[in-house]
Amino acid sequence: MAILAISLDFRSGGQEVATQIGEALGYKCSGKDQSLAYMRAAGDRWERLFRELDQERPSLWDRYDWEYRAFVGLLEAYIYEHASRDKAIIIGQGGSFVLTDLPFVLKVRLTAPFEVRVRRLMEKSEIGEKAAEDIVRRTDKARVGYVKAIYGKDWFDLKNYDMVFNAATHSYEQISKIIVDALRVKDQMITPDTWDLLVGRTIAAQIRAQVLTNPKIHVPTFAVGYDGQKIILQGVIHNKSEYKAIEEIAVSMSKGRPLRNELHGRG
């Protein structure tokens, strides 16, 4: 069935809407808690990084740091894996920007006025207004910066979404009903070819994460894609041993799909 990716302002009701849609359609939600469990399974280092960096805007140094690139690679692999299980909801985590160009993905943005979200946080967490304002403002800034730094996209650009809802003027029930109807329309966009594109990209993301988290491989640049036919390896390597190690990982994880190796050395 169609996939739902929800981008949300902090405390705009994403979890509440996702829960209602999940109950209506039998969808499974994936958000921060599920991503954290995935990182924990990958190793203590990645769980620690997730807790420290969770959607924080990376500095220029971090963007080119091995650990940070591996962290993002793991998170993207998890998003693809969850989506490929079918009946999937991805809450936050940049899901709308990871699952690009897939026609059966419904990308929704939830927002609400700042003061409404501050009040909701105060009620839920029993904290003062000043503390709540600081948390909402800081979290919003981090999410905007994360999307811009990693995906080069403007969080506020409505062209990045299929639907945008103000959760202060629409009830969660109203929003959920509209999204359920839209997902049923998106179902019609699923074909063997479009679903294969998701599966192929999932394999590519898994290969990339495996390479980037390998402490013995430190490639300056590395990308893995799927063009509908082949898994494509691209990047810059230091030596032949890295070339061989990456190719072996890709072959072992490609599930029989053909590979095109476009890795090359410096210079």
Image (spheres, rainbow, N blue to C red):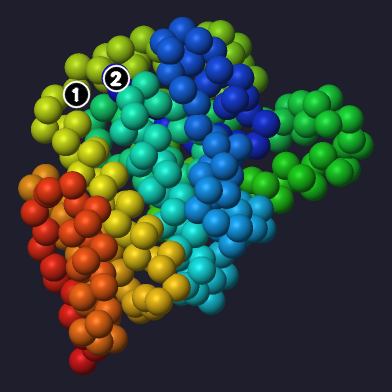
Number of the label disc, if any, that sits on residue 127: none
Which of the two residues, 24 or 219, is positioned nearer the viewer here? 219
- Residue 244: image x %, image y %? 21, 75
Mark 2 vs mark 1, CA separation in Å = 7 Å
Q: Which amino acid does the dot numbered 1 rest on?
A: Ile
- Circle 2 packing at 10 Å, graded few (<14), some (14-19), many (20+), is many
**Horizontal placement of 131 versus 171: left or right?**
right
Which residue is pictured at 38% across the width and 58% down the height?
Answer: 209
- Secondary structure beneath disc 1? loop
Inspect the image, locate mark 2, and give the three-letter code of the amino acid beneath it: Met
Relative to 45, say whether 215 is above or below: below
Quarter placement of the C terminus: bottom left
Would residue 25 appear left or right of 122 to someone viewing this image?
left
Q: Which residue is mark 1?
A: 190
146 is higher (above) or lower (below) than 137: below
Which residue carries the number 2 mark? Answer: 1
List x then y, in percent, for residue 196: 16, 36
> What percent of the width, then of the height, locates residue 197?
18, 39
Q: On the rendered structure, is 12 left or right of 104? A: right
